[in-house]
Image (cartoon, grey):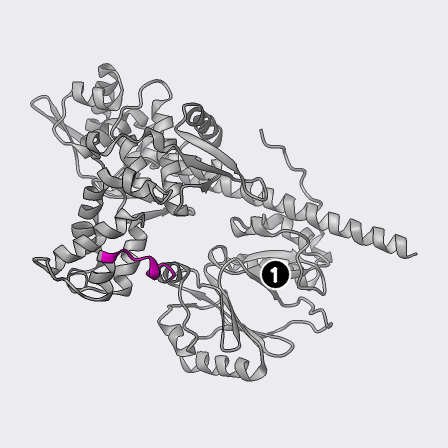
């Protein structure tokens, strides 16, 4: 059980200094604001927790009072990037290039140069130092006005138009000549030397000898990339960097469905042997296993949803050892955090998942999924669909949407609406249409009476229909599911859960930063006493 945090004493509005007002303005502009030591560039302690959450806004006045204010770049500041220019000449050059391109960046002064603040529409910009410009793109921070430089100079905005720093595409920023790139593109570029032979021949050398067509050659390249452990996102980045003829002809979306998805389906049975040699297993292999077996019992639905949520976190982190907070898992599985915590415990006890420790702040655990549960290649048939690039944003999580894709986090499956048993039945029909009650019961691990009740619910709401004793899943849209959830009184519960969890994370982070500031002030007081 989490310890209840005592609210920090609030500073009266009339006593706010300029730093407090500025911090609130920047926070409301969507930036990740936090206090650092006054007249310094140093934080009060570790600020790593602020790479995953912002602070709680009501606590900002007390935290920022008598402090410098800093803003974290990257995802939690709307993909903020700060171009920190080392000299006046570089500063003037960058400002002139932005002005010529019609980009109204926020401009802050400095001792020997200055900074330009903007946001990238294509994702987090990778950190770099190019031609006298330090690019602060992700998980780095900069002091904001009216903070005080160690020399005593007060930072000021030279130019600040609009409520937020301007949102600019990476293409428009090419005028700066800095070679800026997103974190994802740099990660993919850094792996070029690791391209397998077939992929290198097709993508880089453009050699399709021995293949009947370009699409067949690109299919082979996909197979080779998946075979050494790259995930779908990596494969698509490689093809975007080296656009092959068929990829260009059909476009990214169709290529993903017609080539990559087929390659992945063919590769999955070999995932166990091919990937394990690299010490890494593709998360889709675990999803396939979870979807190919029943999850019976009173907690089966919950355990299934939580296991898939762990698979999703594994995919996002891109490694066998991945970070997953209980709140993140709860949001993805559409359950409350207490239920998610118990389900994780059951999965760990069953040997399906392993706890690998916690992060530096102790706010999130690290897990791995047990590869021992995956059957041998010859005895498994993976019959599942993984999320495509069609997504619906839910807070800061993503719930896949589509006729053949799981949408288990939707409010329509809440126990007060259609329920998780209806979801289990609907999922089985998505994987294989025209099933009898007995087959659905066997595959879903539910009893026939439970399946019948669930199917009737689905039928009443237009999500399934029966024909001569066989059941089929109907085509649905997210709008239709929203309408059903609205009628059942559950629409918005997932969003409410996301908001509650966000507030809890913010309050926890606030308590950590408050404790660090108090400890630093205490040490300063002790030093002063000793000097006397």
Q: Is residue 527 above or below residue 346?
A: below
- Looking at the rendering, the stretch of residues picked out in magenta corresponds to 190-197
In front here: 255 or 489?
255
Q: Is 110 left, or right, of 479 in this rendering?
A: right
Instruction: From this view, report whether residue 251 is shown above or below residue 510.
Output: below
- Badge 1 marks a residue whose secondary structure is strand
Location of mark 1 (residue): 70
* Above-or-below relation of 378 to 504: above
Q: Position of residue 262 (x, y in %)?
A: 17, 46
Reply above or below: 12 against 497.
Answer: below
Residue 429 coordinates in the image, percent (x, y):
18, 30
Which of the 4 image quarters holds residue 251?
Answer: bottom left
Say whether residue 520 is magenta: no
Mark 1 surroundings: few (<14), some (14-19) or many (≥20) residues within 10 A: many
Position of the N terminus by quadrant: top right
Front residue of this view, candidates 66 and 233: 233
Q: Quadrant of residue 282?
A: top left
| Residue at position x 30%, y 57% in the image | 195
* Residue 463 visible from this viewpoint: no
Q: Residue at x 17, y 18 (%)?
A: 438
Residue visible at 45% across and 65% down in the picture: 119
Residue beneath the point at 31% across and 23% down: 295
């Amino acid at each position: 059980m989490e310890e209840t945090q005592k609210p920090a004493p609030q500073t009266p509005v009339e006593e706010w200094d300029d730093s407090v007002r500025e911090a609130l303005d920047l926070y409301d502009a969507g930036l990740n604001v936090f206090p650092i030591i006054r007249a310094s560039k140093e934080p009060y302690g570790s600020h790593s927790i602020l790479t995953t959450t912002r602070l709680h806004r009501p606590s900002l006045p007390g935290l920022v009072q008598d402090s410098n204010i800093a803003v974290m770049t990257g995802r939690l500041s709307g993909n903020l990037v700060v171009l920190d220019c080392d000299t006046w000449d570089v500063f003037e050059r960058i400002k002139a290039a932005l002005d010529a391109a019609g980009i109204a960046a926020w401009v802050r002064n400095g001792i020997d140069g200055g900074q330009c603040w903007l946001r990238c529409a294509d994702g987090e910009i990778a950190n770099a130092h190019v031609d006298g410009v330090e690019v602060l793109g992700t998980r780095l921070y900069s002091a904001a006005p009216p903070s005080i430089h160690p020399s005593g100079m007060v930072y000021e905005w030279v130019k600040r138009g609009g409520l937020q720093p301007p949102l600019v595409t990476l293409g428009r920023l090419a005028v700066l000549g800095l070679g800026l790139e997103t974190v994802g593109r740099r990660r993919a570029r850094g792996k070029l030397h690791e391209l397998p032979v077939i992929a290198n021949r097709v993508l880089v050398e453009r050699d399709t000898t021995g293949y009947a067509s370009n699409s067949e050659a690109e299919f082979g390249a996909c197979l080779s990339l998946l075979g050494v452990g790259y995930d779908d996102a990596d494969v698509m980045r490689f093809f975007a960097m080296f656009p092959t003829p068929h990829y260009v002809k059909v476009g990214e979306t169709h290529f993903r469905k017609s080539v990559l998805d087929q390659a992945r389906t063919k590769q999955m049975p070999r995932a166990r042997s091919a990937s394990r040699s690299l010490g890494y297993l593709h998360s889709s292999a675990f999803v396939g296993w979870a979807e190919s077996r029943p999850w019976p019992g009173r907690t089966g639905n919950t355990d299934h949803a939580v296991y898939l949520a762990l698979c999703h976190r594994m995919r996002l982190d891109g490694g066998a050892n991945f970070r997953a907070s209980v709140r993140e898992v709860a949001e993805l599985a559409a359950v409350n955090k207490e239920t998610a915590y118990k389900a994780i415990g059951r999965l760990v006890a069953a040997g399906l998942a392993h706890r690998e420790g916690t992060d530096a702040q102790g706010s999130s655990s690290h897990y791995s999924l047990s590869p021992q549960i995956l059957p041998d290649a010859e005895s498994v048939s993976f019959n599942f669909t993984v999320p495509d690039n069609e997504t619906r944003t839910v807070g800061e999580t993503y719930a896949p949407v589509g006729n053949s894709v799981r949408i288990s986090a939707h409010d329509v499956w809440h126990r007060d609406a259609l329920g998780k048993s209806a979801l289990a039945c609907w999922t089985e029909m998505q994987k294989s249409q025209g099933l009898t009650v007995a087959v659905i019961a066997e595959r879903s691990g539910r009893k026939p009476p439970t399946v019948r009740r669930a199917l009737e619910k689905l039928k009443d709401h237009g999500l399934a229909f029966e024909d001569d004793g066989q059941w089929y899943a109907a085509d649905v849209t997210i709008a239709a599911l929203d309408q059903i959830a609205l009628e059942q009184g559950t629409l918005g519960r997932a969003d409410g859960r996301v908001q509650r969890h966000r507030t809890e994370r913010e309050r926890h982070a606030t308590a950590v930063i408050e404790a660090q500031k108090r400890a630093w002030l205490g040490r300063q007081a002790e030093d002063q006493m000793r000097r006397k």
